[in-house]
Image (cartoon, helix red, strand yellow):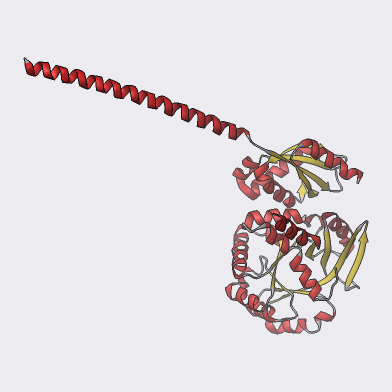
Amino acid sequence: MLINRLASCVIYMNGFIDFWINVEPDMVSHVVDIASKLGYSALCIEDKGFDWRVKRLNVGDYKIVLVKKKTLIEAGEDDLKEKLRGIKTIYPIVSVKPIGIQAARLSARDGRVDTVVLDKDTINFIDKTQARMMKEYRKILEVPLNSLLKSSRREKAMIYRRLLMFYYYGVPIIYSSGACEWNELMHPRSIIELLSSILDVDPKNIALSISSVPREILLRNGVKI
Amino acid sequence: MILALASLIMIIFLLKQLFLIKKSLNEYADLLRIVLRKKYSEALKKMKKLRRRYIVFSIISGEKIDKKELEETLREHLERLYGIIGLMRSDPQIVYYDPLLKRGVIRVRHVEKRLVIAALSTIREINGKKVLIIPVKTTGTIKKAKKYMYYIKQG
């Protein structure tokens, strides 16, 4: 019992991280304000012409870290390779949304790619082979919850099956909000309860997916939290 | 004559045996009835132990939110997520709501509190007004919930 308590303390001690926020530049300050109220310690914001790479802010008593992120949407291998050239000097976090089988396979084995996005556009290209490759190359699967909630019934079922498969293969998963507006942000506790009830996974695993796993990626890319 | 007498005695003996069996069966039936009644009353007692939880929530929105609108939206979202069974089992009720503070308390069954917390996060609009609902704290009594609600205000 005590060990469990200690383990959960260690999980939550680092704070929660929202790995993908896709808002307009004028909305960023409002989103940061709300995210600090929700208890997030770091946010990865999709690049829309920001002049910073990593930004540290003080919102009241809270300290929050903003990290610039780039999500590449590509179908072909050559196009993706070209876009990945020199990308790590500008963006600390790079995600790929593969809309083709070749791009999916390349993103699974390329060292510059941090996460592979699973949503309604990419379900058809993320399969068993992809899961095996991602496990081999230690890649992380990212699931934007906004896209999951907005998708159709059939797409939701397909995403659900793929998530169970990735859990079976032991690939680490990150759940991000994928918010395009401030009201699409989600409270970490709500995310834990929602996903643990849907996927029937231990709530601690979900908590790790929104705290420790994204934190490890940020640390790996030289971002201190 | 002797045969008739013997058969009569036999019939009387059998009737007596039947009577005895019936009596013992009745006793068993009574015993069974007592046991069943006891079990039923125990089950009823267990049924009465419906525990409640009180979820303190806070709303982030630029517009005024009505209690009735909020409750209807919550039920709608809960039904969409977990179906009619989930809605009936959890039975969420907004027992207290302060429209000025935009904070309130939801009463739910203790087993299904997770469903309600999950459903709260999926609410993004109430009658076209953009909202974000934060589940702040879960308590066991309404007194504590109210205390916590106003404690945040002071903090």
How many circles with numbers are drawn on the protein? 0
**Residue A129 drawn at (x, y percent):** 59, 76
Give whichever of B89, B82 is nearer the camera: B89
Q: Is residue B64 left or right of residue A209?
A: right
Q: Is residue B126 left or right of residue A58?
A: left
The answer to which quarter of the image holds residue B86 is: top right
Residue A175 makes an appearance in the image: no
Residue B72 makes an appearance in the image: yes
**Residue A121 drawn at (x, y percent):** 67, 68
Quadrant of the frame with the N terminus of chain B: top left
The answer to which quarter of the image holds residue B55 is: top right
Residue at 63 percent of width and 78 percent of height: A133
**Residue A168 drawn at (x, y percent):** 59, 67
**Residue B103 drawn at (x, y percent):** 83, 42
Give whichever of A10, B108 is nearer the camera: A10
Residue at 81 percent of width and 58 percent of height: A181
Q: Is residue B24 left or right of residue A218?
A: left
